[in-house]
Amino acid sequence: MIQIIPLGGYYEVGKNMTALRIDNEIVILDIGLHLPNYIQFTEDEEEDVKFLSSDKLREAGAIPDDTFLWQYRDMVKAICTTHAHLDHAGAIPYVANRYDCKIFCTRFTGEVIKTICKDEKIKLRNQIHVLDENGQYKLTPNIKIEFINITHSTPQTVIIAIHTKYGIVLYANDYKFDEHPTLGKKPNHKRFEQLGKQGNVLCLITDCLYSADARKMPGERIVRQMLQEVIVDTDSRGKAVIITTFSSHLARLKSIVEFSRKLGRKIVFMGRSLAKYAEAGKNAGIVDFSKDVEIVRYSRQIRRRLKKIQKEGSDKYVLIVTGHQGEPKATLSKMANHELPFMFRSGDHVIFSCITIPIPINFENRANLEKTLRNLGVSIYKDIHYSGHAAREDLREFIGILKPKHLVPTHAEKKTLDAFLGLALELGYKKEAVHIIKNFEILELE
C-alpha cells in the first residue's frame, strides 16, 4: 500500500509538507513555512524574535498542521527536503523534533537549517544527514531514497525519488531545467531518462506553479545579461543604487556582486535573510560573499550603517537589501517609508531582480511600495528575473520522459491546478490518473 498524505502546499502556494506512507513506514517530504502568515505572526522579519512555539505557529497557519501524523510518528523513518527555500525547509526546526528520525538534505540546505536553528535558539535533536546531489541511501529494507540533481533558484536543489516494491514515487517540488546554470550543476537528464525507460515510475508529485505559462522557462544566463544592462550599462553616476532579490538565490547574488564591483562602489548586504543565506553559502563552500561585501544583519545595525552612508554619499554604494515582495517590515519598505535613516533622491535607482510571487498580499504590498518609490521620484527597474519554476512546456517534456502512471500537482492554486489538468489530458492521461487533492485528502495508489 502507498498513501500520499498531503499536509501542506496542496491548493495553496507555500507551507509544503507531504507524508508518503509505504505499508507501515513513512517518509516526510519537505516541511515548509507559509511565509505571509509567518511574517505577519512574527511582525518583523528583520528583528530578533523570541522563541516561537510550534503550537502557536501552527495555529497561525505559518507551519503545516501535522497533527494527523502524531498517531503514526513511530512509523516515520526520515524527513527529506528538496531544497533550502523557507516554504520547503523553513518549518523543519519547529516540527522535526516531534519525529525520531534523521533529516536528509544537501549540504547547503543543511547549513540553512542550522542557521535558522541558531538564529531562533532551537536545539534540533534530529541528526542532519547530508546526501549529495545524485546520491542514494538505503533507508530501510523496503525503501531507498535517491536525490537527483535539478536546477532551481537556490543551490543544490534535488528531485527526490523514493524507491519501493510498488514502484518509484518522484517528489519534484520545486525545479526548472536550466541548461546553462551560472552556479552549480546542470539537471541530471540522463537519470530521468533511465527512470522513464524502466517504466517503473508509479507517481510524479510535481510543482505546477507555472503550468498555465505556455513556454519553456528561460535560464539564469539570460537574467545575468539583464543585470549587466541595468547595473553596468545604465548611467547611475551621482545616484544611489539599491537592488533587491531573493536572499536564497546565490547565483543571482553572485552576478549582482560581480557587476556592482565594476561600478567601483562599496557593496553592502542589508537584512537578516540575506545574512542567513550568505552564511550558509560560505559554510557549504559554494560562494563566500564576505570577501567583497559588507554584511549587516539586524535593523539596529542597518540603522547605524545607513546614517554613515548618508553622510558619505549614497552614490558611493550599492545596497543589496531585503524586501523584494514589498514586505512592510523589510529593509526596502522601511527605507522608502522613512522608518530607516535614508533619503531617496529623484532619479535614484531601485532594481527589483525578482517577480511578485503570485499571492494576493504580495501584489498589494509590492503595489504600495512601488507607489511610494514613484512618489519619491525613484527610477524603478523591475522584473529583472526569470522564475526558478518549470513552465508548461518544461512540464510537458518532463512528464513525457518519465511516463508516470499517476500525476499529483502541488504548490499552486485552482487556476494553475486546472491548467495542469488540461496539460495532462493533452498528454493522453485519463482524468482519474490526475489527482488534484487538497491538504488532508489522503490518496491511496495501487
Image: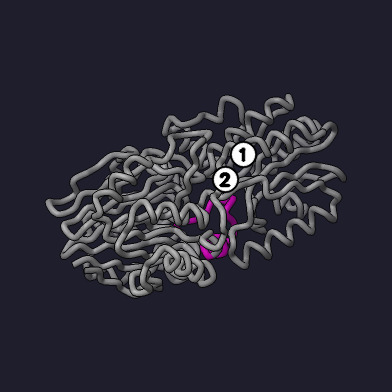
- 10 Å crowding of disc 1: few (<14), some (14-19), many (20+): some
Asked if disc 2 and disc 1 are in contact, CB closer than 8 Å, the reply is yes
* Residue 65 locus on image (x, y percent): 38, 69
Please state which of residues 303 and 332 is positioned toward the viewer in this rendering. 332
Q: Amino acid at mark 1?
A: Ile
Q: Is 223 displayed left or right of 286 in the figure?
A: right
Identify the residue shown where x is 77% and y is 30%: 316
| Relative side of 440 to 248, left or right | left
Q: Quadrant of residue 169?
A: bottom left
Span colored in magenta = 37-51
Q: Is residue 45 magenta?
A: yes
Tell me where residue 446 appears, x and y as whole percent: 21, 69
Image quadrant in which the N terminus is located: bottom left
327 versus 225 height, above or below: below
Q: Quadrant of residue 300?
A: top right
Q: Position of residue 44 (x, y in %)?
A: 59, 57
Residue displayed at 47% across by 50% down: 85
**Element at label 2:** loop
Q: Judge whether residue 41 is colored magenta.
A: yes
Q: Is residue 439 visible?
A: no
- Amino acid type of the residue tagged 2 in the rendering: Pro
CA separation in Å, label 2 and label 1: 7 Å
Q: Residue under circle 2?
A: 218
Residue 222 disc label: 1
Q: Residues within 10 Å of mark 2 (few under 14, many from 20)?
A: many
- Against 109, residue 414 (above or below) is below
> Residue reaching furthest left?
141
- Residue nearest the observer in this picture, 446 or 296: 446
Q: Secondary structure at mark 1?
A: helix
